[in-house]
Amino acid sequence: MQMVTPRRSNPERSAAMRARLVAAARRVFVTHGYADTGTPAIVAEAGVTRGALYHHFPDKQAILRAVVEAESAEVAGAIEAADTSAMSALERLLAGAEAYVHAMEADGRTRLLLVEGPAVLGREEMRRIEAKHGDATLKTGLEELMAKGPAADLPLDALASMLSAMFERAAIDVADGVAAADVLAVLRHILRGLTTGGPAPGAGTPFDVT
């Protein structure tokens, strides 16, 4: 009996072609860098026509944006997968931090999200992408932690922004060869500090080292 393969709909074919182009662009960007990559290289890597590429993306920057969106979604998915309902607020934050560091170890991901993306798309566009994915998860975790502990008086937006920068620095350090275990040990210590409160009365400011 001859098997008949169901034909994919136009939206399905379009989505498949877009995913193919994004995957090919990612490989080329990681290998050669954004500046040294031309659209002909992406077309060749994907095995499609230039017309197919420009049907989905008006220019190389738009392709990078799609790659960055996909990478950010992968990282956010890894963080969400590490979360369980049985965790405390602190455990959830620690698990998310570990998931982030390990997710960023994927080949080329740190370069794409923390170097190429900001340089090409700009910080405002990167913040929009981050807000769509990881930042919302981080803020939710911090809100839960602050509602139940001594960190409640800290400004949420400032705290989320500074922790986000710390996580990015951690990912860059790991990409540069620092052991992930060492980086995670430091992150855990800092994050646990959010549950211990500030200096005791009369102890001076947090910056008083005398």
Image (cartoon, grey):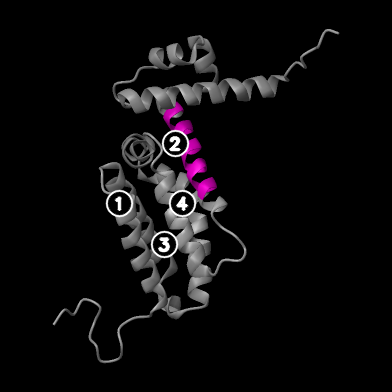
Per the model, the C-alpha gap separating discs 1 and 4 is 15 Å
**Label 1: few (<14), some (14–19) or many (≥20) C-alpha neighbours in 10 Å:** some
**Residue, disc 4:** 99
Q: Residue furthest bottom?
A: 202
Q: Going 50% across and 16% down the picture, which residue do you hit?
A: 53
Disc 2 marks a residue whose amino acid type is Val
Report which quarter residue 156 is drawn in.
Answer: bottom left
Labelled disc at residue 169? 1
Disc 4 marks a residue whose amino acid type is Ala
Labelled disc at residue 160? 3
Disc 1 marks a residue whose amino acid type is Arg
74 in relation to 190, above or below: above
Question: In the rendered structure, which segment of residues is drawn in magenta?
Answer: 63-78
Q: Nearer the viewer, mark 1 or mark 3?
A: 1
Q: Nearer the viewer, mark 1 or mark 4?
A: 4
Per the model, the C-alpha gap separating discs 1 and 3 is 14 Å
**Residue, disc 2:** 68
Element type at mark 4: helix
Whether label 2 touches label 1, CB < 8 Å: no
Disc 3 marks a residue whose amino acid type is Ala
**Label 4: few (<14), some (14–19) or many (≥20) C-alpha neighbours in 10 Å:** many
Pointer 2 or 3: first along the chain: 2
Is 71 left, or right, of 9 in this rendering?
left
Q: Going 36% across and 26% down the picture, which residue do you hit?
A: 29
